[in-house]
Image: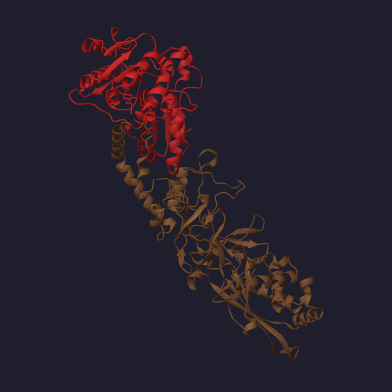
Amino acid sequence: MATKVVMEALSPTMEEGRLVKWLKNEGDKVASGETLAEVETDKAVMELVARGEGVLRKRLLGEGATAPVGQLVAVIAAPDENIDALVAGGGAAPAKEAKPAEEVVAKTQEAAGASTVTRAAEQAQGEAPTPPQQKVPAFRMGTSAPKGQAPPSPTPATEQPRDGGNGEGRTRSSPLARRLAHERGLDLQNVRGTGPGGRIIKRDIEAAVAAGGTAQPPAVAAQAPAPAREGDFSDVPLTQMRKTIARRLSESLGPIPTFYLTAEFDMERVGEMRTAMVQMGDEFKVSVNDIVMKAVATALALHPEVNAHWLGDRIRYFNRVHLGMAVAVEDGLITPVVFDADRKRMSEISREARELAKRARDRRLKPEEYTGATFSVSNLGMFGIEHFTAIINPPETAILAIGAVERKPVDLNGELVTRQRMRVTMSCDHRVIDGATGARFLQTLRRMLENPLMLVY
Amino acid sequence: MAIITYRDALNQALREEMQRDDRVFLMGEEVGVYQGAYKVSKGMLQEFGEMRVVDTPITELGFAGVGVGAAMVGLRPIIEFMTWNFALLALDQVVNSAAKTLYMSGGQYPMAMVFRGPNGAALQLSAQHSQAWESWLAHIPGLKVVAPGTPYDAKGLLKSAIRDDNPVIVLEGEMLYNTKGEVPENEEVVVPLGQAEVKREGTDVSFITWGKMVLVANQAAEQLAKENIAAEIVDLRTLSPMDVDAIATSVSKTNRAVVLEEGWSVAGFGAHVADFIQRECFDDLDAPVVRVHQEDVPMPYAKNLERAAKPDAKKAVAAAKKVLYLE
């Protein structure tokens, strides 16, 4: 049985992949799970693995070439298996578009059903010396793809697993219901099953479609999965006022009505703390950014109202803090996540941030390492940027842009002195965060950075 | 268009084929002087003489073997079993000789012959004489198996069976012999082997069946129609080779299948049909395939118990409602 190797969605947002390097040659034996090639996604270089075993018979994509998710890039088959049809059929159409073609074939066969049978029966009668055998279905003898017999293709990673693997939360559904749901773009999770044991059957799909349940393409905002488990957050339905604010402000300013809060913090004590720690030895050396991240995480734990996701029909407030940090990489940027940053010591944050940044620059981050942030920071201080605004990464609802620490003249209790100062600007999604809400968070952050001993409190 | 009985349709087929080809002859218990245990061969001794309508002793293995030998030298025998219950004695000739000779001789020995007789339960013939054998026979590569459910199909399939160059099993029905149906008089009636027929069109559920159970499916479909459920009846007519396209076409239309068979469930032919459906029509199914069959017990003699053991329209209706999620 031949196995198609298709360009898989190796990151949640990947639409196409560039084949960096083949690790197997044509003619090589491959086992299921073995790495066939390195593929560059929009985020990182990932491994494309075999979903079946046999011989890598044909490679259909050259190194350096790009293919959309779902496109056939290679064929694994037995050494002597005829793969002409597979190879001829592949290369162009992404797998998910193959369905309508199959349907057409099926329909044609239905119409032609009677005549093929007659032919087969007559043939059987004509073959005198041949012992009669069960008639092979006519549609299997032709070149057309049989209905309901799509060649096994690896499940694209974008397809939501129906079963978490432990059987819990499993949606029961008839094969037909699954097919219909797929064709109509319905998520079975949103369909109520009325069959035995809650099985979703044809009539349930029809009812869902009649009720206008035809799913829209999922909004970008809802796509990024938060590593959220029950208890890690609370979902709050939108109040009418919240709805109106959301609608009115979106009309005014793009899909995410953003406003900006800028504050300047005195960083003198953070500087003193850092100097003291550096003097204690290399093992205690932390960067200003590490201290700011620790302070932001701690402040977020106190202000869940800015540690939230906008989910379209509700707001998800997190009681864990997963802090995204924007990292500049060659020709782009990526936002790896320090999970549970509020519960980590400064040294842990420092070490993790350093490692994540390095792996980001090497393009070796795993998808789970750059998804699931509840709030992000972006620091351009090292470039001497005094002040800037950052763009919110949905479904997150805020991002903090951190400028450079600079010595400036300030009025301190009536006396003009120079102090180390740092300007931050918080971009806020007004659908979730109001001006005063964001301001209160920055107030807390100011207290922490101006009195860093609070971080050990 | 003439309305004739299933019995007379078979009689017409036998006579027409014996007139058409003088290598064809009929042999079995009581086929000649007695005019057939069920009068299927009525008038044939008079018409064709005792060289071609041969009465045998009560020796199923013996005359089946004589038939095999005759086929090997180029004749085209029709072996009548008084019932397929008696044919058990002859199964060695059917399975090991008739079914294998073409294969084992590389086609050097011809084996154009027909084994025919009533199959399945009649009324109160008790455990030994109320059995349906299609699952046993369709199991054997090298045999073709047909099970006509109507007079038209009985005539058309028997004629095709006689003309076929392979050994063909014809499963008739004692309870079918007196049923009547349209069979055209002045045209040749031949039903190709391996071709099912949709006996009733419907959109809600497919009854897949054959032989006597076509009548049961019809009764069930009538009852369902009163509840606005449109059942489709696919009469396989030939079990081997099975018309898989007809099954797939119907199931893809109705999304639900009930397989009706006369025999027991374990390793029954209906299991083979259900296997095909789940494998080839998986994405079309809205419910698991349900089978209706005889209860897995020797057929009781007592009338009430026999009725309870047999598959009937009531059970077929219940099965249809089950796959329709109506109960």
Residue found farthest to the bottom: A416
* Depth check, front residue: B58 or B294: B58
Residue A45 in sight from this viewpoint: yes
Q: How many marks?
A: 0
* Left or right placement of residue B231 versus residue A345 in this view: left
Relative to residue A276, is residue B209 depicted above or below?
above
The red-tinted chain is B
Residue B81 in sight from this viewpoint: no
Relative to residue B185, is residue A204 depicted above or below?
below
Here the colouring is by chain
Horizontal and vertical percent position of residue B212 = 37, 22
Horizontal and vertical percent position of residue B300 = 49, 14
* Depth check, front residue: B129 or A134: A134
Relative to residue A341, is residue A123 depicted above or below?
above
Residue found farthest to the right: A280
Please name the residue shown 30% across and 42% down the image. A112
Q: Quadrant of the N terminus of chain B?
A: top left
Horizontal and vertical percent position of residue A96 = 44, 56
Residue found farthest to the left: B186
* Left or right placement of residue A26 versus residue B225 in this view: right
Horizontal and vertical percent position of residue B62 = 39, 13
The brown-tinted chain is A
Relative to residue A82, is residue A313 depicted above or below?
below
* Depth check, front residue: A207 or B220: B220
* Quadrant of the image occupied by residue A443: bottom right
